[in-house]
Image: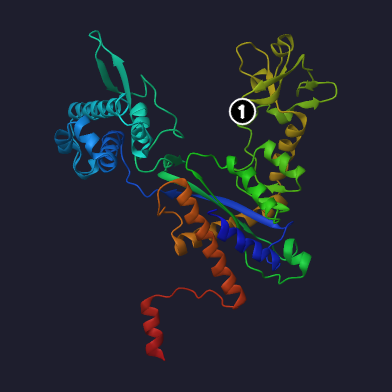
Amino acid sequence: MERLVFDRLVEHCRQEGLIGAGGKQRTDSTHVISAVRDLNRLELAGESVRAALEALAVAAPSWLGQAMPVIELELRYAARVDSWRLPTSKTKRDRLAEVYGQDALALLHAIHAPDAPVWLREIEAVQLLRRIFMQTYYVHTDARGREVVRKREAEVDGVPPGHLRLASPYDRDARWSAKGDELFWCGYKVHLTETCDDGTTGAAAATGADAQAPNLITDVTTTVSTAPDVTATAGIQQRLTERQVKPGEHYLDSGYPSAELVTAAAGEGITMITPLLADHSAQARAAEGFDKSAFRIDWTARQVRCPESRTSTGWYPVQQHGHDAIVIEFARADCSPCPSRRKCTTAARGNRMLTLRPRELHETVAAARAERKTDTWQAKYALRAGIEGTINQALDATGLRRARYRGLPKVSLQHAYSATAINVIRLDAHWTDQARRPRTSRLTRLAHQLAA
Protein backbone atom coordinates (compact mmCIF):
# COMPACT_ATOMS: atom_id res chain seq x y z
CA MET A 1 0.00 0.00 0.00
CA GLU A 2 2.85 2.39 0.83
CA ARG A 3 4.17 2.02 -2.73
CA LEU A 4 0.89 2.96 -4.43
CA VAL A 5 1.86 6.52 -5.45
CA PHE A 6 5.29 5.45 -6.69
CA ASP A 7 3.87 2.48 -8.64
CA ARG A 8 1.21 4.61 -10.33
CA LEU A 9 3.78 7.18 -11.45
CA VAL A 10 5.98 4.44 -12.90
CA GLU A 11 2.97 2.98 -14.71
CA HIS A 12 2.09 6.39 -16.13
CA CYS A 13 5.65 6.86 -17.39
CA ARG A 14 5.52 3.40 -18.96
CA GLN A 15 2.32 4.26 -20.80
CA GLU A 16 3.90 7.51 -22.01
CA GLY A 17 6.84 5.58 -23.44
CA LEU A 18 9.38 7.02 -21.03
CA ILE A 19 10.08 3.63 -19.46
CA GLY A 20 9.91 0.26 -21.12
CA ALA A 21 11.06 -3.33 -20.95
CA GLY A 22 14.30 -4.49 -22.52
CA GLY A 23 16.36 -1.43 -21.69
CA LYS A 24 19.25 -0.74 -19.36
CA GLN A 25 18.82 -0.19 -15.64
CA ARG A 26 21.23 0.15 -12.73
CA THR A 27 20.93 -0.41 -8.98
CA ASP A 28 22.85 0.67 -5.91
CA SER A 29 22.23 1.06 -2.19
CA THR A 30 23.09 3.51 0.55
CA HIS A 31 22.82 3.51 4.32
CA VAL A 32 19.97 5.16 6.20
CA ILE A 33 20.33 6.47 9.75
CA SER A 34 17.42 5.67 12.05
CA ALA A 35 15.33 8.27 13.89
CA VAL A 36 16.40 7.05 17.34
CA ARG A 37 19.31 7.84 19.63
CA ASP A 38 22.46 5.78 19.51
CA LEU A 39 22.72 3.77 22.73
CA ASN A 40 25.47 1.58 24.10
CA ARG A 41 24.53 -1.74 25.71
CA LEU A 42 24.25 -0.27 29.21
CA GLU A 43 22.09 2.63 28.06
CA LEU A 44 19.94 0.25 26.02
CA ALA A 45 19.31 -1.95 29.06
CA GLY A 46 18.19 1.00 31.19
CA GLU A 47 16.18 2.76 28.49
CA SER A 48 14.26 -0.42 27.66
CA VAL A 49 13.06 -0.57 31.30
CA ARG A 50 12.15 3.11 31.18
CA ALA A 51 10.24 2.74 27.90
CA ALA A 52 8.21 -0.16 29.29
CA LEU A 53 7.42 1.74 32.50
CA GLU A 54 6.31 4.78 30.51
CA ALA A 55 4.03 2.65 28.34
CA LEU A 56 2.53 0.89 31.36
CA ALA A 57 2.01 4.20 33.18
CA VAL A 58 -0.28 5.20 30.33
CA ALA A 59 -1.93 1.85 29.56
CA ALA A 60 -2.35 0.44 33.11
CA PRO A 61 -1.49 3.04 35.79
CA SER A 62 -3.52 1.37 38.54
CA TRP A 63 -1.93 -2.01 37.96
CA LEU A 64 1.56 -0.54 37.80
CA GLY A 65 1.07 1.37 41.07
CA GLN A 66 0.11 -1.84 42.86
CA ALA A 67 2.55 -4.26 41.21
CA MET A 68 5.77 -2.23 41.26
CA PRO A 69 7.50 0.25 43.64
CA VAL A 70 6.77 3.25 41.43
CA ILE A 71 8.29 5.84 43.77
CA GLU A 72 11.62 4.01 43.86
CA LEU A 73 11.62 3.37 40.12
CA GLU A 74 10.84 7.01 39.41
CA LEU A 75 14.17 8.01 40.91
CA ARG A 76 16.03 5.91 38.32
CA TYR A 77 13.79 6.17 35.26
CA ALA A 78 12.16 9.60 35.32
CA ALA A 79 14.69 10.98 32.80
CA ARG A 80 16.12 9.34 29.71
CA VAL A 81 19.08 7.17 30.54
CA ASP A 82 21.31 9.00 28.05
CA SER A 83 20.44 12.42 29.51
CA TRP A 84 22.90 12.04 32.40
CA ARG A 85 26.50 10.92 32.53
CA LEU A 86 27.07 7.25 33.23
CA PRO A 87 29.67 6.23 35.83
CA THR A 88 33.23 6.13 34.57
CA SER A 89 34.27 3.36 36.95
CA LYS A 90 33.87 -0.14 35.53
CA THR A 91 32.76 -1.42 38.93
CA LYS A 92 30.01 1.18 39.17
CA ARG A 93 28.93 0.58 35.59
CA ASP A 94 28.70 -3.15 36.23
CA ARG A 95 26.64 -2.47 39.33
CA LEU A 96 24.32 -0.17 37.38
CA ALA A 97 23.89 -2.84 34.69
CA GLU A 98 22.97 -5.31 37.43
CA VAL A 99 20.36 -2.89 38.83
CA TYR A 100 18.82 -2.41 35.37
CA GLY A 101 18.69 -6.17 34.93
CA GLN A 102 17.05 -6.74 38.31
CA ASP A 103 14.43 -4.06 37.61
CA ALA A 104 13.71 -5.57 34.18
CA LEU A 105 13.38 -9.06 35.61
CA ALA A 106 11.06 -7.88 38.41
CA LEU A 107 8.88 -6.01 35.94
CA LEU A 108 8.66 -8.99 33.57
CA HIS A 109 7.78 -11.32 36.44
CA ALA A 110 4.98 -8.96 37.49
CA ILE A 111 3.63 -8.69 33.94
CA HIS A 112 3.60 -12.48 33.50
CA ALA A 113 2.11 -13.18 36.93
CA PRO A 114 -1.14 -15.22 36.87
CA ASP A 115 -3.20 -12.34 38.26
CA ALA A 116 -1.81 -9.73 35.80
CA PRO A 117 -3.95 -8.72 32.79
CA VAL A 118 -2.90 -10.84 29.81
CA TRP A 119 -3.07 -7.89 27.42
CA LEU A 120 -0.13 -6.23 29.17
CA ARG A 121 2.15 -8.71 27.44
CA GLU A 122 0.98 -7.43 24.03
CA ILE A 123 2.26 -3.90 24.60
CA GLU A 124 5.12 -3.30 22.18
CA ALA A 125 7.42 -1.72 24.75
CA VAL A 126 6.94 -4.76 26.99
CA GLN A 127 7.73 -7.16 24.16
CA LEU A 128 10.88 -5.20 23.30
CA LEU A 129 11.90 -5.14 26.97
CA ARG A 130 11.67 -8.92 27.10
CA ARG A 131 13.79 -9.34 23.95
CA ILE A 132 16.41 -6.81 25.05
CA PHE A 133 16.60 -8.42 28.50
CA MET A 134 17.20 -11.85 26.94
CA GLN A 135 19.86 -10.44 24.62
CA THR A 136 21.64 -8.49 27.37
CA TYR A 137 21.42 -10.63 30.50
CA TYR A 138 21.91 -14.17 31.66
CA VAL A 139 19.77 -15.46 34.57
CA HIS A 140 20.87 -18.41 36.67
CA THR A 141 20.02 -19.85 40.09
CA ASP A 142 22.61 -19.73 42.85
CA ALA A 143 23.19 -22.28 45.62
CA ARG A 144 20.42 -20.73 47.74
CA GLY A 145 17.86 -21.00 44.94
CA ARG A 146 17.84 -17.27 44.19
CA GLU A 147 17.68 -15.86 40.66
CA VAL A 148 20.90 -14.04 39.84
CA VAL A 149 21.01 -11.61 36.94
CA ARG A 150 24.34 -11.22 35.16
CA LYS A 151 25.20 -9.19 32.09
CA ARG A 152 26.10 -11.33 29.11
CA GLU A 153 29.70 -11.35 27.98
CA ALA A 154 30.35 -12.16 24.34
CA GLU A 155 33.32 -14.39 25.09
CA VAL A 156 31.51 -16.39 27.81
CA ASP A 157 27.77 -16.37 27.18
CA GLY A 158 27.58 -15.29 23.54
CA VAL A 159 25.42 -12.54 22.12
CA PRO A 160 22.81 -12.66 19.34
CA PRO A 161 23.96 -12.03 15.75
CA GLY A 162 23.66 -8.50 14.42
CA HIS A 163 20.52 -9.12 12.37
CA LEU A 164 18.63 -10.15 15.53
CA ARG A 165 20.14 -7.77 18.09
CA LEU A 166 17.87 -4.85 18.96
CA ALA A 167 19.45 -1.40 18.97
CA SER A 168 16.63 0.66 20.49
CA PRO A 169 13.48 0.13 22.56
CA TYR A 170 11.68 2.56 20.26
CA ASP A 171 12.44 1.00 16.86
CA ARG A 172 12.24 -2.77 16.57
CA ASP A 173 13.69 -2.80 13.03
CA ALA A 174 16.76 -0.57 13.38
CA ARG A 175 20.04 -2.50 13.46
CA TRP A 176 23.70 -1.67 13.85
CA SER A 177 25.72 -2.42 10.74
CA ALA A 178 29.11 -1.73 9.22
CA LYS A 179 30.48 -1.27 5.72
CA GLY A 180 34.21 -1.54 5.39
CA ASP A 181 36.39 -0.31 8.22
CA GLU A 182 35.08 3.24 8.48
CA LEU A 183 31.28 3.29 8.10
CA PHE A 184 29.17 2.25 11.09
CA TRP A 185 25.51 3.17 11.45
CA CYS A 186 22.27 2.24 13.18
CA GLY A 187 19.29 2.09 10.86
CA TYR A 188 18.39 0.71 7.46
CA LYS A 189 19.50 0.37 3.86
CA VAL A 190 17.72 1.63 0.73
CA HIS A 191 18.18 0.31 -2.83
CA LEU A 192 17.41 2.54 -5.82
CA THR A 193 17.02 1.28 -9.40
CA GLU A 194 16.79 3.65 -12.37
CA THR A 195 16.79 3.54 -16.16
CA CYS A 196 20.01 4.44 -17.96
CA ASP A 197 19.20 3.98 -21.66
CA ASP A 198 21.15 5.80 -24.36
CA GLY A 199 18.33 5.84 -26.90
CA THR A 200 19.43 2.67 -28.69
CA THR A 201 17.60 0.24 -26.41
CA GLY A 202 14.45 0.03 -24.34
CA ALA A 203 11.44 2.32 -24.63
CA ALA A 204 13.12 4.97 -26.77
CA ALA A 205 14.18 2.50 -29.43
CA ALA A 206 10.90 0.56 -29.39
CA THR A 207 8.53 3.55 -29.59
CA GLY A 208 10.64 6.15 -31.32
CA ALA A 209 10.45 8.39 -28.26
CA ASP A 210 12.89 11.15 -27.45
CA ALA A 211 16.34 9.62 -27.04
CA GLN A 212 17.01 12.19 -24.31
CA ALA A 213 14.24 10.89 -22.04
CA PRO A 214 15.22 11.32 -18.38
CA ASN A 215 16.59 8.54 -16.24
CA LEU A 216 13.70 7.59 -13.96
CA ILE A 217 13.64 5.51 -10.77
CA THR A 218 11.80 2.26 -11.41
CA ASP A 219 12.17 0.57 -8.02
CA VAL A 220 12.90 1.57 -4.43
CA THR A 221 13.46 -1.03 -1.72
CA THR A 222 14.16 -0.51 1.97
CA THR A 223 15.68 -3.30 4.06
CA VAL A 224 17.22 -3.70 7.48
CA SER A 225 20.82 -2.55 7.54
CA THR A 226 22.21 -6.04 8.13
CA ALA A 227 20.64 -7.54 4.99
CA PRO A 228 23.35 -8.13 2.34
CA ASP A 229 22.74 -6.52 -1.05
CA VAL A 230 22.57 -9.95 -2.68
CA THR A 231 19.32 -10.70 -0.82
CA ALA A 232 17.59 -7.79 -2.58
CA THR A 233 18.52 -8.68 -6.18
CA ALA A 234 15.81 -11.24 -6.96
CA GLY A 235 13.05 -9.11 -5.43
CA ILE A 236 14.07 -6.04 -7.43
CA GLN A 237 14.05 -7.95 -10.71
CA GLN A 238 10.74 -9.60 -9.89
CA ARG A 239 9.04 -6.24 -9.21
CA LEU A 240 10.46 -4.76 -12.41
CA THR A 241 9.03 -7.71 -14.32
CA GLU A 242 5.62 -7.31 -12.68
CA ARG A 243 5.56 -3.61 -13.66
CA GLN A 244 6.40 -4.60 -17.26
CA VAL A 245 9.68 -2.65 -17.15
CA LYS A 246 12.02 -5.63 -16.94
CA PRO A 247 15.52 -4.58 -18.04
CA GLY A 248 17.46 -6.31 -20.76
CA GLU A 249 20.70 -5.34 -19.01
CA HIS A 250 20.92 -4.81 -15.27
CA TYR A 251 24.05 -3.02 -13.97
CA LEU A 252 25.03 -3.74 -10.35
CA ASP A 253 28.10 -3.71 -8.15
CA SER A 254 29.74 -6.83 -6.75
CA GLY A 255 27.50 -6.97 -3.68
CA TYR A 256 24.39 -7.95 -5.64
CA PRO A 257 25.24 -11.01 -7.76
CA SER A 258 25.76 -14.69 -7.17
CA ALA A 259 26.23 -17.45 -9.70
CA GLU A 260 22.70 -18.67 -9.00
CA LEU A 261 21.19 -15.19 -9.49
CA VAL A 262 23.11 -14.51 -12.71
CA THR A 263 21.99 -17.84 -14.15
CA ALA A 264 18.37 -17.40 -13.07
CA ALA A 265 18.23 -13.85 -14.42
CA ALA A 266 19.62 -14.99 -17.78
CA GLY A 267 16.81 -17.54 -17.94
CA GLU A 268 14.33 -14.67 -17.53
CA GLY A 269 15.98 -12.59 -20.25
CA ILE A 270 17.96 -10.29 -17.95
CA THR A 271 21.71 -9.93 -18.46
CA MET A 272 23.37 -8.90 -15.22
CA ILE A 273 26.36 -6.65 -15.94
CA THR A 274 28.16 -7.09 -12.66
CA PRO A 275 31.54 -8.28 -11.37
CA LEU A 276 31.25 -11.62 -9.63
CA LEU A 277 33.46 -11.90 -6.60
CA ALA A 278 36.96 -13.08 -7.43
CA ASP A 279 38.42 -16.42 -6.41
CA HIS A 280 39.90 -15.82 -2.95
CA SER A 281 41.52 -19.23 -2.51
CA ALA A 282 45.13 -19.39 -1.36
CA GLN A 283 46.18 -20.60 -4.81
CA ALA A 284 44.41 -17.70 -6.54
CA ARG A 285 46.04 -15.16 -4.24
CA ALA A 286 49.49 -16.62 -4.82
CA ALA A 287 51.37 -15.32 -7.82
CA GLU A 288 52.25 -18.85 -8.99
CA GLY A 289 49.42 -20.83 -7.42
CA PHE A 290 47.17 -23.23 -9.33
CA ASP A 291 43.61 -21.98 -8.85
CA LYS A 292 40.49 -23.64 -10.27
CA SER A 293 40.95 -22.05 -13.67
CA ALA A 294 44.19 -24.02 -14.11
CA PHE A 295 42.33 -27.34 -14.07
CA ARG A 296 40.55 -28.87 -17.08
CA ILE A 297 37.16 -30.34 -16.27
CA ASP A 298 35.57 -33.16 -18.26
CA TRP A 299 31.95 -32.98 -17.12
CA THR A 300 30.91 -36.00 -19.20
CA ALA A 301 33.62 -38.31 -17.86
CA ARG A 302 33.36 -36.69 -14.40
CA GLN A 303 37.09 -36.21 -14.20
CA VAL A 304 39.45 -33.27 -13.71
CA ARG A 305 42.99 -32.96 -15.10
CA CYS A 306 45.53 -30.87 -13.20
CA PRO A 307 48.25 -28.66 -14.75
CA GLU A 308 50.73 -31.55 -14.37
CA SER A 309 48.39 -33.84 -16.39
CA ARG A 310 47.31 -35.95 -13.43
CA THR A 311 43.69 -37.14 -13.45
CA SER A 312 41.41 -36.93 -10.44
CA THR A 313 40.39 -40.12 -8.67
CA GLY A 314 37.24 -38.90 -6.86
CA TRP A 315 34.09 -37.07 -7.95
CA TYR A 316 31.62 -36.62 -5.05
CA PRO A 317 28.33 -34.68 -5.36
CA VAL A 318 27.59 -33.15 -1.93
CA GLN A 319 25.50 -30.51 -0.18
CA GLN A 320 27.38 -27.54 1.31
CA HIS A 321 25.50 -24.83 3.18
CA GLY A 322 22.28 -25.89 1.51
CA HIS A 323 23.69 -25.75 -2.04
CA ASP A 324 24.77 -28.45 -4.48
CA ALA A 325 28.50 -28.84 -4.91
CA ILE A 326 31.04 -31.34 -6.25
CA VAL A 327 34.17 -32.31 -4.33
CA ILE A 328 37.10 -33.41 -6.50
CA GLU A 329 39.95 -35.44 -5.04
CA PHE A 330 43.35 -36.27 -6.50
CA ALA A 331 45.32 -39.34 -5.42
CA ARG A 332 47.96 -38.85 -2.76
CA ALA A 333 50.31 -41.03 -4.78
CA ASP A 334 50.10 -38.49 -7.62
CA CYS A 335 50.32 -35.33 -5.49
CA SER A 336 53.08 -36.25 -3.03
CA PRO A 337 55.93 -36.61 -5.59
CA CYS A 338 54.59 -33.85 -7.86
CA PRO A 339 57.20 -31.10 -8.53
CA SER A 340 54.46 -28.44 -8.46
CA ARG A 341 52.96 -29.57 -5.18
CA ARG A 342 53.85 -26.39 -3.29
CA LYS A 343 52.12 -24.30 -5.93
CA CYS A 344 49.02 -26.43 -5.68
CA THR A 345 48.32 -27.41 -2.08
CA THR A 346 49.54 -27.11 1.50
CA ALA A 347 47.11 -29.74 2.79
CA ALA A 348 48.39 -31.92 5.60
CA ARG A 349 47.13 -35.01 3.78
CA GLY A 350 49.35 -34.15 0.86
CA ASN A 351 46.77 -34.27 -1.95
CA ARG A 352 44.79 -31.55 -3.72
CA MET A 353 41.02 -31.30 -3.41
CA LEU A 354 38.70 -28.99 -5.33
CA THR A 355 35.14 -27.88 -4.65
CA LEU A 356 33.15 -27.09 -7.79
CA ARG A 357 29.65 -25.81 -8.37
CA PRO A 358 27.29 -27.65 -10.72
CA ARG A 359 28.30 -27.33 -14.35
CA GLU A 360 25.97 -24.48 -15.37
CA LEU A 361 26.95 -22.35 -12.39
CA HIS A 362 30.65 -23.13 -12.73
CA GLU A 363 30.70 -22.15 -16.39
CA THR A 364 28.72 -18.99 -15.65
CA VAL A 365 31.25 -17.89 -13.04
CA ALA A 366 34.24 -18.79 -15.21
CA ALA A 367 32.86 -16.90 -18.21
CA ALA A 368 31.97 -13.85 -16.11
CA ARG A 369 35.41 -13.66 -14.51
CA ALA A 370 37.13 -14.01 -17.88
CA GLU A 371 34.93 -11.33 -19.48
CA ARG A 372 35.52 -8.94 -16.61
CA LYS A 373 39.21 -8.69 -17.55
CA THR A 374 38.46 -7.29 -21.03
CA ASP A 375 38.56 -3.57 -21.86
CA THR A 376 35.19 -3.85 -23.58
CA TRP A 377 33.50 -5.05 -20.41
CA GLN A 378 35.18 -2.39 -18.29
CA ALA A 379 33.99 0.37 -20.62
CA LYS A 380 30.48 -1.04 -20.61
CA TYR A 381 30.35 -1.41 -16.84
CA ALA A 382 31.25 2.27 -16.39
CA LEU A 383 27.56 3.02 -17.00
CA ARG A 384 26.75 1.76 -13.50
CA ALA A 385 28.54 4.69 -11.84
CA GLY A 386 25.73 7.07 -12.80
CA ILE A 387 23.48 5.72 -10.04
CA GLU A 388 25.73 7.49 -7.53
CA GLY A 389 24.46 10.81 -8.88
CA THR A 390 20.87 9.72 -8.35
CA ILE A 391 21.60 8.78 -4.74
CA ASN A 392 23.25 12.19 -4.19
CA GLN A 393 20.24 13.96 -5.70
CA ALA A 394 17.93 12.02 -3.40
CA LEU A 395 20.08 12.97 -0.42
CA ASP A 396 20.07 16.66 -1.33
CA ALA A 397 16.42 16.96 -2.34
CA THR A 398 14.66 14.63 0.07
CA GLY A 399 17.07 13.78 2.90
CA LEU A 400 16.96 10.12 1.91
CA ARG A 401 19.71 9.07 4.28
CA ARG A 402 17.93 10.13 7.49
CA ALA A 403 14.81 8.26 8.52
CA ARG A 404 12.01 10.58 9.60
CA TYR A 405 10.00 7.80 11.22
CA ARG A 406 10.51 4.65 13.27
CA GLY A 407 10.02 1.14 11.95
CA LEU A 408 10.67 -0.44 8.58
CA PRO A 409 7.14 0.07 7.14
CA LYS A 410 7.17 3.81 7.78
CA VAL A 411 10.74 4.25 6.56
CA SER A 412 9.79 2.32 3.40
CA LEU A 413 6.92 4.78 2.90
CA GLN A 414 9.31 7.71 3.26
CA HIS A 415 11.64 6.28 0.63
CA ALA A 416 8.79 5.53 -1.77
CA TYR A 417 7.76 9.19 -1.61
CA SER A 418 11.38 10.30 -1.97
CA ALA A 419 11.75 8.25 -5.15
CA THR A 420 8.45 9.66 -6.43
CA ALA A 421 9.67 13.20 -5.76
CA ILE A 422 12.91 12.62 -7.69
CA ASN A 423 10.93 11.30 -10.65
CA VAL A 424 8.63 14.34 -10.55
CA ILE A 425 11.62 16.69 -10.49
CA ARG A 426 13.16 14.94 -13.50
CA LEU A 427 9.91 14.81 -15.43
CA ASP A 428 9.33 18.52 -14.82
CA ALA A 429 12.81 19.33 -16.10
CA HIS A 430 12.23 17.09 -19.14
CA TRP A 431 8.77 18.39 -20.09
CA THR A 432 9.60 22.05 -19.48
CA ASP A 433 13.02 21.69 -21.10
CA GLN A 434 14.67 23.45 -18.18
CA ALA A 435 18.26 22.53 -17.59
CA ARG A 436 19.40 22.39 -14.00
CA ARG A 437 20.91 25.73 -13.06
CA PRO A 438 24.43 25.47 -11.64
CA ARG A 439 24.85 26.62 -8.08
CA THR A 440 26.46 30.00 -7.54
CA SER A 441 27.65 31.68 -4.38
CA ARG A 442 25.98 34.76 -2.94
CA LEU A 443 29.16 36.70 -3.66
CA THR A 444 29.00 35.72 -7.34
CA ARG A 445 25.34 36.75 -7.60
CA LEU A 446 26.15 40.09 -5.98
CA ALA A 447 29.03 40.65 -8.39
CA HIS A 448 26.71 39.95 -11.36
CA GLN A 449 24.17 42.44 -10.02
CA LEU A 450 26.80 45.15 -9.61
CA ALA A 451 28.19 44.48 -13.07
CA ALA A 452 24.74 44.88 -14.60
Task: Name the amino acid, label 1.
Answer: Ser
**Rendering coords of residue 446 (x, y %):** 36, 83
Q: Residue at x 45, y 73 (%)?
A: 439
**Residue beneath the point at 60% across and 63% down:** 9
Q: Quarter holding the C terminus?
A: bottom left
Q: Position of residue 290 (x, y in %)?
A: 68, 26
Whether 373 is drawn above or below 101: the answer is: below
Q: Quadrant of residue 51?
A: top left
Please say if 412 is above or below 153.
Answer: below
Q: Is residue 134 visible?
A: yes
* Whole-percent x, y for residue 120 in the image: 33, 34
Instruction: Tell me which corner region of the image, top left, top right, bottom left or bottom right, holds residue 45.
Output: top left
Of residue 87 and residue 35, the one placed in the foreground of this image is 35
Looking at the image, which is closer to me, 326 or 431? Answer: 431
Q: Is residue 347 left or right of residue 82?
A: right
Q: Secondary structure at mark 1?
A: loop
Identify whether 357 is placed above or below 235.
Answer: above
The residue sitting at 44% across, 40% down in the picture is 178
Q: Which residue is mark 1?
A: 281
Q: Is residue 216 visible?
A: no
* Total count of labels: 1
Crowd band around label 1 with a 10 angstrom C-alpha radius: few (<14), some (14–19), many (20+): few
Display colour scheme = rainbow
